[in-house]
């Protein structure tokens, strides 16, 4: 499998003010072409640092793709340094000079002399036209290596990579495609270390497997990459790996690839022809938002009540005053009455309720920040779950809403048991 190393240049990327979205985009596009990214680095606009980055990248990989540093200013050094490392001389390309002049003429501006550096290229390089800016890119094959230079702005870089670089990679590396398969398995429940332990045997059994665990808003996404002898072998391996993971953590699997927790719950509700209503306190309507963000949710979602105050709980959900006084708003008893009240008011077959303390402070020592009670009402069933979440206010609310949805998901996939 061919390998690639990515370099992003620009001091602004090191200051925390600009995200390096280019390397994420490029890495995904390369993977889809069967080219494995083995490293990436972000460097500032410094000659020696950029030089070391290119030297290391060329030692590591067959293909080096850089973005940034192709402008006309003194700190735009990428092309000069890359050509120095590759041992290439740069000459003025008159076609590019004229293109630059035309670019400025169309805007009725005079061209600064400094822009001429953007027309300097090694004679053996393929110049990549930039229709959205003054900085052309470059594609160079030399000494069994490929060097790709692209501008930094994503709106310029992305179409250039897709329209100009990918066809050249297909031309030069046609054998790279059709051996690698990728899949994402989404998990909710166990933590990363617990999940890793559950998957140890899978990792040991399949040396062809590359696995990464990624935490995403309370979920853990298992990123799987399989490279077999050919596409059929890769597909066979992926199915075996997926089945082994299902046997290890099956009840915690939310979905695959483009599935989301909400879409899986929605599918279950449609299949069972059941309506859902929700009653929220600490999540403040977040659960209802998650549900209604999905188009077509009116088919299975009755609606919601955001009962933030005790008065709202009593008025709209029939929570008893004595229950609130005896147990407090954050209690399993109130969660039950919220769900029961929501079910009765809506007439929906299913109701979820959430009450808890999202923080940042708690009024009671015995009820710390992160304590949340979730109740599912399904017919005569009342299932209460006590959770102790850790994190800031936003993360606790997200975790509470997702855990409520997962409680419903598990109930539905178990046939309502």
Image (cartoon, rainbow, N blue to C red):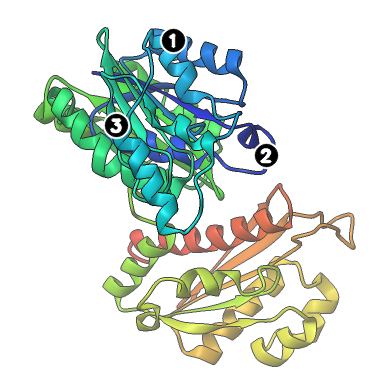
The answer to which quarter of the image holds residue 74 is top right
The answer to which quarter of the image holds residue 187 is top left
CA distance for labels 1 and 3: 18 Å
Classify mark 3: residues with Cα within 10 Å, few (<14), some (14-19) or many (20+): some
Q: Is residue 333 above or below residue 301?
A: above
Res 161 seen here:
yes
Res 248 seen here:
no
Task: State the residue at coordinates (46%, 71%).
Answer: 293
Q: Secondary structure at mark 3?
A: strand
Classify mark 2: residues with Cα within 10 Å, few (<14), some (14-19) or many (20+): few
Task: State the residue at coordinates (14%, 28%).
Answer: 171
Image quadrant in which the N terminus is located: top left
Comparing labels 1 and 2, the label whose residue is closer to the camera: 1
Comparing labels 2 and 3, the label whose residue is closer to the camera: 3
Q: Which mark is residue 16?
A: 2
- Circle 1 is placed at which residue position? 85
- Circle 3 is placed at which residue position? 127
């Amino acid at each position: 499998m061919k390998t690639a190393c990515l370099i992003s240049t620009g001091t602004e990327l090191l200051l925390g003010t600009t995200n390096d979205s280019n390397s994420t985009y490029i890495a995904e596009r390369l993977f889809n072409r069967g080219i494995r990214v083995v490293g990436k680095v972000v460097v500032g606009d410094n000659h020696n640092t950029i030089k070391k980055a290119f030297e290391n990248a060329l030692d590591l990989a067959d293909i080096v793709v850089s973005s940034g540093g192709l402008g006309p200013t003194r700190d735009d050094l990428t092309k000069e340094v890359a050509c120095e490392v590759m041992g290439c001389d740069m000459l003025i390309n008159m076609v590019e000079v004229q293109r630059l002049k035309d670019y400025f003429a169309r805007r009725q501006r005079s061209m600064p002399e400094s822009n001429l550096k953007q027309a300097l290229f090694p004679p053996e390089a393929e110049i990549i036209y930039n229709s959205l800016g003054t900085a052309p890119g470059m594609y160079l094959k030399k000494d069994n290596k490929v060097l790709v230079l692209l501008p930094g702005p994503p709106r310029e870089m992305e179409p250039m990579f897709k329209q100009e670089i990918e066809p050249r990679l297909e031309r030069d590396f046609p054998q790279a495609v059709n051996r690698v398969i990728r899949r994402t398995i989404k998990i909710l429940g166990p933590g990363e270390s617990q999940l890793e332990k559950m998957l140890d045997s899978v990792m040991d059994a399949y040396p062809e497997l590359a696995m990464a665990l990624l935490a995403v808003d309370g979920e853990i996404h298992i990123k799987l990459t399989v490279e077999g002898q050919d596409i059929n072998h890769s597909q066979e391996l992926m199915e075996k790996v997926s089945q082994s993971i299902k046997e290890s953590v099956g009840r915690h699997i939310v979905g695959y690839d483009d599935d989301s927790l909400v879409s899986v719950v929605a599918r279950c509700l449609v299949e069972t022809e059941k309506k859902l209503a929700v009653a929220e306190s600490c999540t403040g309507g977040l659960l209802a938002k998650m549900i209604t963000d999905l188009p077509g949710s009116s088919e299975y979602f009755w609606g919601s009540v955001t009962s933030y105050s005790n008065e709202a709980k009593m008025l709209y959900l029939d929570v008893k005053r004595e229950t609130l006084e005896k147990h407090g708003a954050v209690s399993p008893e109130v969660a039950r009455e919220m769900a029961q009240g929501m079910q009765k008011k809506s007439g929906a077959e299913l109701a979820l309720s959430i009450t808890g303390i999202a923080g940042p402070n708690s009024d009671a020592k015995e009820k710390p920040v992160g304590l949340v009670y979730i109740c599912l009402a399904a017919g005569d069933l009342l299932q209460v779950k006590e959770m102790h979440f850790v994190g800031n206010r936003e993360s606790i609310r997200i975790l509470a809403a997702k855990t409520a949805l997962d409680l419903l998901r598990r109930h539905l996939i178990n046939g309502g048991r």
